Image (cartoon, grey):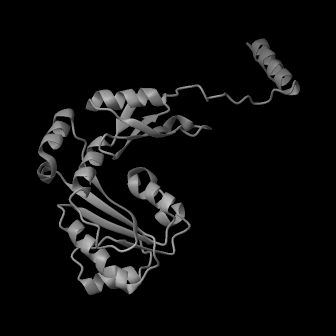
Amino acid sequence: MIKRMLLVAVMCAAFILGGYGCMEIDRSTVNEAEPSDMLVYLQEKYNQPFSVVEFIPAPRGFNDFLNENILIARSEEGFFVNVRSLVKDPYVFFDNYASAYASWLVDNTLDYSAVGGLSSAKTHVSIYEELNEAEILQLQDSGLKYLVEYDIGASCLLAIKTPLSESSVSGIYEVYKQICAIKSVNTRLQVAFSVADDLAEKYVMNFPYYGKTNWQEFDPGISNYAFISDEGLSFEEFSDQILNWEDTR
């Protein structure tokens, strides 16, 4: 036994002296789900075509088994669906189709036309429980009236390509009142002023993915920003929060 341990020690020393050191395993081809697999999963699960917008492979490195591959796909209606798979379970897929579809339904009922200088706008709905296949079919058949069965949250994002001014607040308030009228346990409004159009649209249209980063960090072109989470504000209260917003989150 002692001889065997000495032999192992000598072999390890030989590897080190020979210049091998600690060898890093190349994980670039290990446990890798292909974008085509994720797209097929989405199309078969919801029985409709989707197109690939972007594939974001999982970061590689030490202890990376919890990192995720992300496929961003576009539905026929034009909304984005995010498909995820963990490195440790590459062919077990998760998606946010139900919330993305509900967002599309809600967003189509809102009127953003009162907001001057609008670059991009979208309201994202989060359904706070996982829907099974039958429930998703019911949502597709029944539309908005089916959402009253669930607790949902709504996040409205407005990207405005003009500087903040008192005159711009009234149009934003009109959108805020519409958002507050949605049956929701958690209504949020984010407004960014003087933003780059391309970055604004990317962030606004797929907030469920990019929202893990604060908007100000994502887009350094923002000159003013406000995050409103209170419901039922009067115009004066709302205007004060927009014009004098401070980050207390």
Q: Is residue 216 visible?
A: yes
Q: What quarter of the picture does the N terminus occupy?
A: top right
Front-most of 19 and 52?
A: 52
Front-most of 126 and 105?
A: 105
Q: Is residue 180 left or right of residue 201?
A: left
- Above or below, 190 relative to 152: below
Task: Identify the residue at image location x=39%, y=54%.
Answer: 205
- Above or below, 109 relative to 166: above
What is the quadrant of residue 13 in the picture?
A: top right
Q: Position of residue 86 (x, y in %)?
A: 46, 34
- Above or below, 118 relative to 100: below
- Above or below, 205 relative to 29: below
Q: What quarter of the picture does the C terminus occupy?
A: bottom left
Front-most of 58 and 19?
A: 58
Count numbered badges in the picture. 0
What is the quadrant of residue 84 in the picture?
A: top left
Task: Identify the residue at image location x=37%, y=86%.
Answer: 166
Q: Position of residue 209 (x, y in %)?
A: 43, 50
Q: Position of residue 208 (x, y in %)?
A: 38, 52
Judged from this view, the residue extending furthest toward the right is: 17
